[in-house]
Image (cartoon, helix red, strand yellow):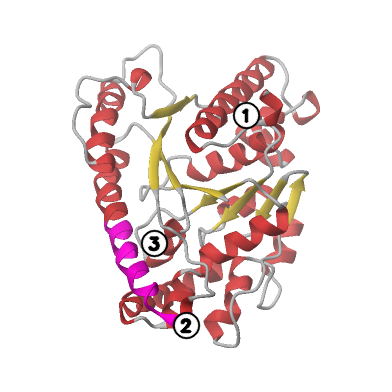
Amino acid sequence: MTTVAFFNNKGGVGKTSLVYHLAWMYADLGVTVVAADLDPQANLTSMFLDEWEKDELWSSSPPRETVHGALLPLLEGTSDISTPVMLMPRPALCLVPGDLSLSVAEDEFSGQWPRCLDRNVRAFRVISALSRILQRARAEAEAELVLVDVGPNLGAINRAALIAADFVVVPLAPDLFSLQGLNNLGPTLATWRHGWEQRLAQARMTDGLKALTLPAGRMKPIGYVVQQHAVRLDRPVKAYARRMDAIPDEYRTAVLQKSGGKNKQVENDKHCLGLLKNYRSLMPYAQDARKPMFFLKAADGAVGGHVNAVRDCYHDFRDLACAIADRIGVRCPQLD
């Protein structure tokens, strides 16, 4: 299983929309994919469902058919995790629905983290729970790729979610807070990775964990994606350009903990996976149609100048999907 998490502790950088559109794109390119909503805000799930479907999913009593429902037996101490119930928006695309109730598990994930160093079996079950839920989802869907959306924070739930990830993509916007978020994200990933390595060493000496599949916790950063702001052509935006120019160096020093990014531009930076244009005018149509922007048709309102924007959007996301697939070793059959 190849798992990619999209993570930045700065919100508003297009993370959820990125996961949503890439999930659809990979399915279109012949890759069976699971989109996992591990953000307690559940915005990714909201993008897939209409109002009636959301009401049916989240108004029911626990355990709901969400990631929290799969986690609930373990949290309540009645059993281990259950196999998640998945939705299938289209062939080759499965969704593990999110749930606001996931946020109540924050204290449990936080409290069990230090207990792993004491070789506590339940602690390892809790910390590895999200990883094992994703493993079951992948097996159930027979998927080649799992894309994970997480919340914009450095909390214990995100730590458990990131441990499940083989690779990490960092969505960015060219603004001050997005860049400052990199200064938190890089050292935090390194700390989490080192901390999990210590716990895995304890797990290998614990007989009660022999049958438990624990994640490797690689969390390897493979690059960043920049969501470009709309820039007025009649007025130079110096702050925008300055932030764009700062991204390569900030990413290298903060996330990769390396030097050598000075004077590089985003367009020529090997760590830049893609530059996405602002398709703001297409998003309302996509939300109404419950489909990605690049699949909009005339019947959805994509007429006139929107036709070219839809075509450009498709090519942008296809190129991005291919760039990510190349770095993680996933083959896209429709491109063969």
Seen in the picture, residue 264 relative to 64 is either above or below; the reply is above
Disc 1 to disc 3, C-alpha distance = 34 Å
The residue that mark 1 highlights is 282
Could you tell me how far apart the alpha carbons at marks 1 and 2 are, in whole angstroms? 53 Å
In front: 273, or 291? 273
Q: Tag on residue 159? A: 3
What residue lies at 61% left-to-right and 33% top-to-bottom? 331
Q: Which residue is painted at 37% across and 67% down in the image?
A: 200
Q: Is residue 233 visible?
A: yes
Task: Specify the segment rendered in magenta.
Answer: 191-208
Residue underneath mark 2: 208
Q: CA distance from mark 3 to mark 2?
A: 23 Å
Q: Is residue 159 left or right of residue 134?
A: left
Task: Mark 3 or mark 2: name the one nearer the start of the chain.
Answer: 3
As drawn, is 80 to the left or to the right of 50? left
Name the kind of residue labelled 2 in the image: Gly
* Residue 60 occupies quadrant: bottom right
Q: As drawn, which residue projects farthest toward the bottom? A: 78
